[in-house]
Amino acid sequence: EQIEKAGYDHFMLKEIYEQPDAITDTYRGRMLVEEGIIRMAGVDDNMARIANAKRIIIVACGTSWHAGLVAEYIFEDLARIPVEVEYASEFRYRNPVISENDVVIAISQSGETADTMAAIKLAKEKGAFVFGVCNVVGSSISREAHAGAYTHAGPEIGVASTKAFTTQITVLTLMALKLAKHRGTISDSTFRFHLQELERIPAKITKVLEENDHIKIIAEKYKNSPNCLYLGRGYNFPVALEGALKLKEISYIHAEGYPAAEMKHGPIALIDESMPVVVIATSKGHYDKVVSNVQEIKARQGKIIGIVTEGDEAVRELADYVIEIPETIESLTPLLTTIPLQLLSYHIAVMLGKNVDQPRNLAKSVTVE
Ligand code: G6P
């Protein structure tokens, strides 16, 4: 096992650090930047069916569901196809309206999650086209789907998902871009710019990983907090949910993710000097509005950890700590903002002496209901 961990203390840390390579493996061979082409066999072979979908329904569980929420923003924004994101466990039992014009995308790292499998069987029965996004090659869901795309993240051992999440977002981004190009909802220059920016993401993640020591200091400061709130807007709202899930899963600290603007409808009541609030406030995601949220937290003595774009000034002035990420296009920011949140949870859990790779009560692959 020590050999498999390749010098890292835990699989989770190794997998966090593998993300630049994992994402490169995800787009390698699919994205031809110079030519301005995306090749994905599962999409190319079924283009008419997928690109003419009246609606895309994404079904998944856990972290994969969060990747689905990010994908909702990307598909609607770029490809202009309406998207619904469903917990597979709810979808399968609520007599959903599904038609032959729907495309169901099932996202699953393991490809074995029972609820996700049941959801796609139901969708198939009702005539929908099912596209699988799985990491494990040959897994049950990848075989049950009509078509699909693998994430190629390599084996993920840590129960808390890290590189599976960012590679799922990468595959879904490629798919959305491809559909957008086919449907004519994106200009050629914007399409090419996305490819160029996506190609730069691995190096930018490497840069975020260099913040590790700084993130450790923040972890030390807040490791004994019983609660933590995560806020984000737009593309980074699902990242806030995922950040909170990571902390819960491995450190057993109660954490909640919220859309920043919803803070005033509840969570603001919880804010006092003992509440750390992680706010994702990147420059392009409704920045000014998020800065107002930060001011509201500050006014209530909440502790602020800002995830900001390099060169940020307004949040830095108000926050207790900031973690900078390099600039990129808004739709790609989740691939960067997720990284410090993974590291923050990891360090807190290690400092608290928790079993990071195998947290209590959780399983890597949930093959029962
Ligand atoms: C379990 C794992 C999570 C994962 C979820 C969905 O709860 O602990 O990390 O996100 O299942 O798994 P899947 O393999 O379908 O992505």
Image (cartoon, rainbow, N blue to C red):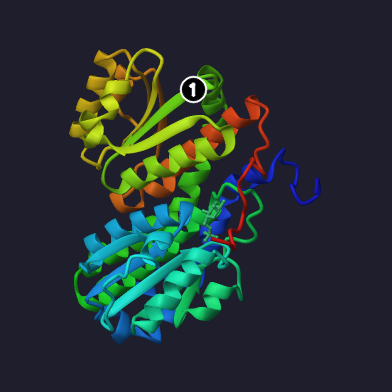
x%, y% of residue 2?
80, 45
Q: Is residue 5 above or below residue 297?
A: below
The residue depicted at 37 percent of the width and 70 percent of the height is 175
x%, y% of residue 114?
53, 66
| Residue 122 in view of the camera | yes
| Residue 210 in view of the camera | no
Give the quadrant of ligand 1.
bottom right
From the viewer's side, name the closer residue of 151 and 314: 151
- At label 1, the amino acid type is Pro
x%, y% of residue 254?
47, 31
Q: Is residue 291 above or below residue 39?
A: above
x%, y% of residue 285?
25, 42
From the viewer's side, name the closer residue of 246 and 252: 252
Q: Classify residue 309 by image quadrant.
A: top left
Q: Classify residue 273 by image quadrant.
A: top left
- Reading the image, the residue beneath label 1 is 226
The residue depicted at 24 percent of the width and 81 percent of the height is 52
The residue depicted at 55 percent of the width and 50 percent of the height is 161
From the viewer's side, name the closer residue of 90 and 359: 90
